[in-house]
Image (spheres, rainbow, N blue to C red):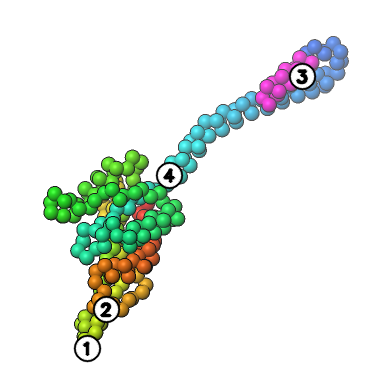
Amino acid sequence: MIATLVVGGLLLAGAATAGARVLRSPAARIALFGLAAAFLLAAATSAFLDRVLATAQPAAAIQPDQTARIPRVMVVGDDGPEGSIRRSDPAFEAALAAFEDELRRSGFAVSDGRAISTINEALDRVRRPDTEIVQLARRQQREPLDAIVVLSLFVRLEFGQGGPTLAGRSNTTLSGRGVATLLRAADSANIGVFEAISPTRWPVGFECARTCQVQTTGAEAPLVAEAIAGQVVTAMRNAR
């Protein structure tokens, strides 16, 4: 486009100069010189605008890449607290998968934190500090982490009026409970602790021991995990 304008302007200027003997009318020669000047001015203006756009384009191209990075979260299971369901239990695995899926549906990238133990066996099963859990997570993950979620599941027993038993019968209901601690990866800060309880309350008899209780509450463990994940998503979006 620019080259065409330049060539056209030069041709018009040449025609006006060469045709001085033929074109006896000064007005015609002035018109040709005017057209030539207009072509050359348009070429110069177009070249200037192209240069301005070229210098502005890289910054505009970089900006979307910086803002489009998906926040990355690592979910770590914690079965250290007393009464918590073990990470190897199918109920916990189902809840953990539901938790991660909910984060993905909300637009977060999820890293697998199953290899990280929250318990320091060398110190008689003492729970690691939050700073150490974050360090282990960052060491395992090559890509930058934004947050670490430490998730625990529990069996929750509720006793009715009169205590655990009433007239020789069980007076206890069973439910599932989940707790998640949200840690910021940059400085190990505790952003919040979130909790949810299963919608159903199951009457439990004396014959329903620990294994029975975990299997019963495990039916709604994914619902509990999804509810907590929703709270975590809201907290992370507000913290950004």
What's the residue type where badge 4 is placed? Arg
CA–CA distance in space, label 4 to label 2:
51 Å
Tell me which label, 4 or 3, sits earlier in the chain.
3
Residue located beneath label 1 in the image: 167
Q: Where is residue 69, by image quadrant?
A: top left
Tell me which label, 3 or 2, sits earlier in the chain.
3
Q: Residue at x 29, y 60 (%)?
A: 89
CA–CA distance in space, label 1 to label 3:
112 Å
Locate residue 114, reporting x and y percent: 30, 50
- Predominant SS along the magenta part: helix
Residue located beneath label 2 in the image: 205
Is any atom of residue 148 visible in this view? Answer: no
Tell me which label, 1 or 2, sits earlier in the chain.
1
Locate residue 7, reporting x and y percent: 71, 19
Residue located beneath label 4 in the image: 69
Q: Nearer the viewer, residue 139 or 37?
A: 139
Residue located beneath label 3 in the image: 12
Q: Is disc 1 surrounded by few (<14), some (14 to 19) or many (20+) residues within 10 Å? A: few
Q: Is residue 7 left or right of residue 159?
A: right
Q: Where is residue 211, by image quadrant?
A: bottom left
What's the residue type where badge 2 is placed? Gly
CA–CA distance in space, label 3 to label 2:
103 Å
